[in-house]
Amino acid sequence: MSGQWWRVSVLSGLCVSGLLVVSVLGLIFGTAHVPWRDAVGYVWADLIGGIVSAGDAADYRIVVDSRLPRVLTGALVGAGLSTVGLVVQAMVRNALADPYVLGISSGASVGATAVVLFGVFAGAGIYALPTAAFLGALVATVVVFAIARSAGGLTPLRLVLTGTALGYGFSALTTVLVFLAPAGDAARSVMFWLLGSLAATSWRSVWLVAAVVLIGLAVVAGLARQLNALAMGDEVSASLGLRASRFRMLLFVVAALMTGVMVSVCGAIGFVGLVVPHVARLLVGADHRRLVVVTPLIGAVFLVAADLLARTLVPPQELPLGAITAAVGVPVFLLLMRRRGREAV
């Protein structure tokens, strides 16, 4: 085993251990404190179909029905956003790109805002918000794809410019909808959702996110060698037998589907897809065969830990998850940029 792959193995083990630790902490802490032995015991009882005493029923429901799906969704979304960030940065050959540079999250925000403020898709009940958000993301994906695609296929510059421009357009539409909202409390709910939250997660959302994210991760892992070629430029890709424009379309579809589903469940959570791939490159290098292993694990640990902070820093209130990821992500990103600047001198 080479030195780099040995580092990947060690780092992966550390990430898995860290994820277990923050996951258990996520089961313990919240509005109601549950001892760690009890929390782990409740999860084990749920897995094997064990019996829980009547006196423990309330804590059992808190852990199994609320906190466990929240932790699992946080890990999946963190892994998914980080992987999509890695893919988008290779796709557009821009280290500053993230899952939201394509304008997809802004489209999802329009759909979610319409539900919260004006009752669109009210007949869908609890599925109204994720349905409208996903449809908004789907519309944004189609529009970006249609405008960015040219005779030469999807080029990085056209994709970035189109996604950025339409993202601003969808954000402006969301602002107009909030301004026209008849109730102030509804507008506050929209703003909280736009900054990201795992508060509304349930077992239904866990299965949806798990299906999409795990399939997406498998696809990206299988395309690691092609991502290496694409990151070196279209001419190099062509010399290696890779049709860059067609491959970029495939990546765009995968990134759009994963982003749309994740945003529809937990809102727009920034900086995860931007910062985590940079940290992973710093640790294991630029080879995507290694990055597709490490990046999702770091992202999962980061988002579960961020969600834990969001709901424990100012109890009983919960902070928007995007505020926590930004508070951590901004200084980390600036440090990484400063480090890269020194290395370039």
Image (cartoon, rainbow, N blue to C red):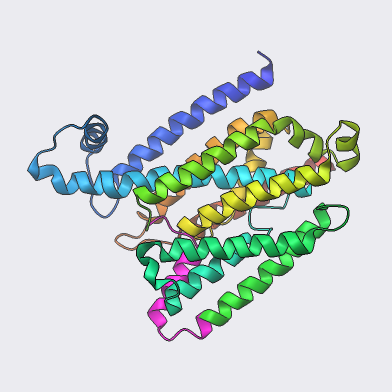
Give the residue at x 35% y 48%. Answer: 203
Please state the horizontal and vertical placement of residue 138, each as a whole percent of the image.
60, 60
289 lies left or right of 29: right
Residue 51: name its quadrant. top left
Please state the horizontal and vertical placement of residue 229, each as a whole percent of the image.
81, 34
Give the residue at x 26% y 45%. Answer: 63
Quarter of the image for the N terminus: give it.
top right
Quarter of the image for the C terminus: give it.
top right
258 lies left or right of 321: right
Task: Tally the marks.
Answer: 0
Please state the horizontal and vertical placement of residue 166, each as a whole percent of the image.
70, 68
Specify start and end residues of the magenta stretch as a single range. 178-199
Give the residue at x 50% y 25%. Answer: 13
Image: 321 above or below 14:
below
Q: Is residue 313 visible?
A: yes
183 is within the stretch colored magenta: yes
Please state the horizontal and vertical placement of residue 157, each as a whole percent of the image.
82, 56
Residue 172: name its quadrant. bottom right
Q: Is residue 304 visible?
A: no
113 lies left or right of 295: left
Q: Residue furthest top?
A: 1
Residue in the foreground of this view, choosing between 78 and 142: 142
Residue in the foreground of this view, choosing between 164 and 324: 164
Image: 280 above or below 265:
above
67 is within the stretch colored magenta: no
Q: Residue furthest left?
A: 54
Q: Residue furthest front?
A: 123
176 lies left or right of 142: left
